[in-house]
Structures are given as C-alpha cells and as structure tokens.
Amino acid sequence: MNLQSPHKPLYLLQLEALLNRLPDHNRSEKLESTYRRQLAGFIGESSLPFHFENLNTNASHLELYGLRLPYKHHFFQIDCLSLWQHILFHFEVKHLKGKLDFNQSGQLIQINENGQEEVYDDPILQAQYQKQKLQQFLQQHGFPHIPIKTLILFTHPKANLQFDHPMALPIQQFSHSIQQVLETSSSPHIKRPQLFEIGYFLKNQHTERFVDVIEQSGISKRKIKRGVYCQHCRHVKMVRIYGTWQCPACKRKDKYAHIPALRECVLLFGPYLTNRQVRYFLEIESIHLATRLLKQFNTPAFGWKKDRVYDFRHLLES
Ligand SMILES: [Zn+2]
C-alpha cells in the first residue's frame, strides 16, 4: 500500500519553474545537471510501486516515497521506505544508466554510451548515514526496535554495475532479493496496527524543502520571464481581452491561464505575495483586475491596503 506515493519533490517543481521562466542562454550547465539528477530520482522512485505490487506475499506492508524528516535541527531524506512487521527496507534510489563503478576516492562514477563521465557522492556512505538517523529518529519517538535493511537500488534497467557490494541491488534482482530477506526474517517485531501507526507518523513528519532557487543559481531576478504564457505555444505571451486570456498566435482563449503562471511565481518567489508583486509577475496594470483574480483563489490574506499579503502555501502542495 502506498501511504505516500512517489511525487515530484518541491525542489524539482521549483527547478522546473525556474527553467521554464529563464531565457535559453541563461540556463547554465550546472542548473540543467541539477535538474536532470532530481528528475532521474523521481523517475526511479515512480517505477517502484509496480515492483512492490508484484511481490509474492500476503503480508501487510506500507511504502512511503520521498520522505524528508526533521532530525536535530536539520532534515534527512529517505527515497523509499517499505515497512513490514518484521523489517523495514530503506532504499536509496539511483536511476542511472551506463557503466557504474567506484573510483579510488569512493565516488560513484557513471560512464555513459558516449564515454562521458559523471561523478556522484558515494551512495553507500550516504545511505548508511541515513539509516543511522532513521534508527535514532524512530527510537527518539518511542517506537520499538525493528531491524532496518538498507539497499542502494539501481532502478534504471540499463544500469551496468561494475562492482559487487552486498548493499547494491539492480532492479532486475529486486523481487528475488526482497522475497529472500522476507522469508528468512525472524518473527514480527510489531503488531499490524503499530505498522500503520509508524507509517502515518512518518507521513505526518514529512516536510518539503523550499529553496530560493534563483539565489542558489546565482541568476539575477530581472532575468526571470514575466507574464502569462500560452500552454500550447509555450513561448507566446497571452493578452487579457474581455475577461479572459487570449493567445495572439493560436487565438486560443483560456480564462484560467494565470493560474499556472501564479503557481510558478510562488515556486520562485515564495508563497506570500502582495497585489503589487502579482501584478508585476503577471504583467497586469489594473490593481482591480489583480484583486479580482486574487479573490478567485479564496486564499487567506492578512494586512491592509497595499501591504495586504496573500498566503499561497496551498499552491506549493503537489
Ligand atoms: Zn497559443
């Protein structure tokens, strides 16, 4: 059962909004690479529910994806956690294709078909740290001890592992390995209701990360493209005519075209916006039109007149 389905993390949505709102020549290789890595992680996680559903078992189990949990004034991340009554599987997901090996400094090296190399942090070390934190986190919140099995799961069918490590698992061996661990596990450590209690507790502790992606990328705010864009023509700005938005190129009308634009504004600049900021981003001149559009969202607001701030936190929830 998916207690928390694979979902695009907030950071990935923010990177998408940033790339969408940047002119091509302002997209740095570093930004594109960060985006590709985040997207690959999401694709890898998204492939897992299918594999869990195909396990040959009647035992209760819960899966949580993309967890970010608070720990000692910081957070730690778990790509996928599968909870059973006698064991917890903790997966660090790597969706990488091509030859994969470790260099002498313990970094993971990916060599793709063109012979290009990409360097990644040691996933084994990363996963071990996360396992320790998860153990301490559960203990700190008073849950009984359950053994945790940590695995680095290589989800890409074309991952060609050049090394052998007991924690590394290619997706083709997923069912066999998990089944084997389940069959050799000792008696249950928790009862079925406790399994759900832990699952819901972890789900409620999950906290998304909001990053100032503009500042992180070192881009000037003035480079961000403003306006309401046509969803079909992509690069054409719509104009406001007779209570709707119209694309001057394809002539399509869309009453709600400002909604995705405002969502991108929130992903880039944060969820608290004034009427003036909304007008600036959507390129609306009329304060009354902006007020009317803002009212459609039925969103909480505080402050008065020009200092009134609208709370768009709900637009950050995926
Ligand atoms: Zn159009």
Image (spheres, rainbow, N blue to C red):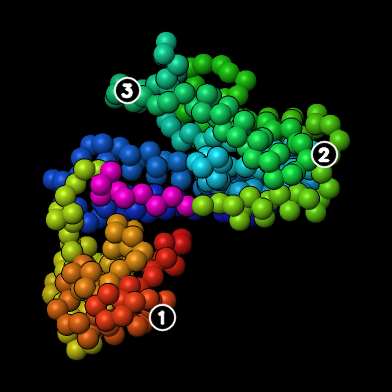
Q: Quadrant of residue 311?
A: bottom left
**What amino acid is labelled 3 in the image?**
Glu
Instruction: Check if mark 3's residue and mark 2's residue have beta carbons within 8 Å.
Output: no
Sequence-wise, the earlier of marks 3 and 1 is 3
Mark 2 or mark 1: whose residue is earlier in sequence: 2
Residue where numbered disc 3 is placed: 117
Q: Nearer the viewer, residue 83 or 143?
A: 143
Q: Quadrant of residue 247?
A: bottom left
Residue 182 spot, x, y in % from top left: 76, 34
Give whichever of discs 3 and 2 has the lower sequence position. Answer: 3
**186 is higher (above) or lower (below) than 144:** above
The magenta stretch spans residue 209: yes
Residue type, mark 2 in image: His
Neighbours of disc 1 within 10 Å: few (<14), some (14-19), many (20+): few
**Vertically, is 197 above or below 271?**
above
Q: From mark 2 to mark 1, how far is it between C-alphas?
A: 47 Å
Q: Out of 19 and 302, give the one closest to the viewer.
A: 302
Give, as a single range, the part of the protein colored magenta: 208-216
Amino acid of disc 1: Asn
* Residue occupied by mark 2: 189
